Image (tube, rainbow, N blue to C red):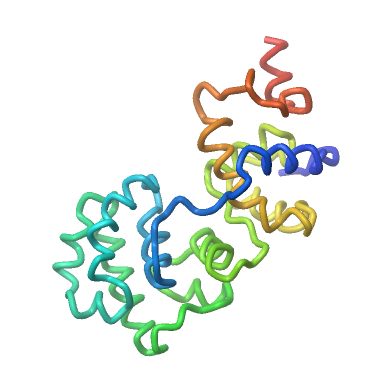
């Protein structure tokens, strides 16, 4: 794991802001609790699939009390089409119990969020960024891939990438970095068949340069 030469962050984020001027989460939600539920459900599942399930689920589930009133078996059935649904149902139910004790308030720190069942570092950072506008970057496979391809980092795991980005990304870009990089990885710098020819960053992209040499 290492940091490469200083990336041209101004060029990178100016371009990403042009592509995604209103970058935000693609998960649908209305209440803070619904956001937390949606993010937990999104682990190893597409946002599109989560939104398909929550379109019905969130008609009745708006607060943690609603999960408890529905009951664990019924809640599990309601999210059955989501990957790893049994574990997610258990975690969300237990999290709902804890939040009811806290009068429904979603924690505002990463440490407190990670005490909730089903909430790891990535989930906590997504909630902090979306709900509380904290300048943090949740590293998923998209962020990990994009940052390595652009030469921002040279890492083998998302966890390694996360640790480096905390100090590497300039503060003035942190607020936009999270969603801009995710959306760029989702729609342009894809795992397969990335749109390198259309990308205005290709002249400063080590990944594109390496492809040209092959």
Q: Closer to the camera, 69 or 15?
A: 15
Q: Residue at the spot x=69%, y=21% of the render?
A: 208
Q: Closer to the camera, 94 or 172?
A: 172
Residue 40 at x, y percent in the picture: 39, 61
In the figure, is residue 153 to the left or right of 51? Answer: right
In the figure, is residue 205 to the left or right of 87? Answer: right
- The relative height of residue 97 versus residue 204 in the rendered view (above or below) is below
Residue 93 at x, y percent in the picture: 28, 73
Q: Residue at the spot x=38%, y=60% of the render?
A: 38
Quarter-of-image position of residue 68 = bottom left
Quarter-of-image position of residue 101 = bottom left
Residue 196 at x, y percent in the picture: 63, 22
Residue 164 at x, y percent in the picture: 72, 52
Q: Residue at the spot x=53%, y=68% of the render?
A: 131
Q: Closer to the camera, 119 or 21?
A: 21
Most extreme residue toward the right, as rendered? Answer: 6
For the N terminus, give its image quadrant.
Answer: top right
Q: Residue at the spot x=24%, y=59% of the render?
A: 86
In the figure, is residue 62 to the left or right of 179? Answer: left
Instruction: Give the number of marks.
Output: 0
Quarter-of-image position of residue 19 = top right
- The relative height of residue 141 versus residue 133 in the rendered view (above or below) is above
Most extreme residue toward the top, as rendered? Answer: 214
């Amino acid at each position: 794991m290492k940091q490469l030469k200083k990336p041209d962050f101004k060029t990178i984020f100016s371009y990403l802001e042009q592509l995604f001027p209103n970058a935000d989460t693609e998960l649908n939600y209305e209440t803070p609790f619904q956001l937390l539920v949606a993010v937990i459900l999104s682990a190893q599942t597409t946002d599109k699939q989560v939104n398909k399930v929550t379109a019905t689920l969130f008609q009745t589930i708006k607060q943690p009390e609603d999960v408890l009133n529905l009951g664990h078996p019924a809640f599990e059935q309601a999210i059955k089409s989501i990957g790893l649904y049994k574990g997610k149902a258990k975690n969300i139910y237990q999290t709902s119990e804890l939040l009811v004790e806290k009068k429904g308030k979603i924690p505002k720190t990463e440490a407190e969020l990670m005490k909730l069942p089903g909430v790891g570092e990535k989930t906590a950072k997504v909630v902090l960024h979306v709900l509380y506008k904290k300048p943090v970057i949740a590293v998923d496979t998209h962020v990990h891939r994009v940052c390595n391809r652009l030469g921002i980092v040279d890492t083998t795991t998302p966890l390694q990438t996360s640790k480096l980005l905390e100090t590497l990304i300039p503060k003035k870009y942190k607020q936009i970095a999270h969603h801009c990089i995710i959306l760029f990885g989702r729609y342009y710098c894809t795992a397969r068949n990335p749109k390198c020819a259309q990308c205005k960053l290709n002249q400063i992209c080590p990944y594109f340069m390496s492809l040209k040499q092959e």
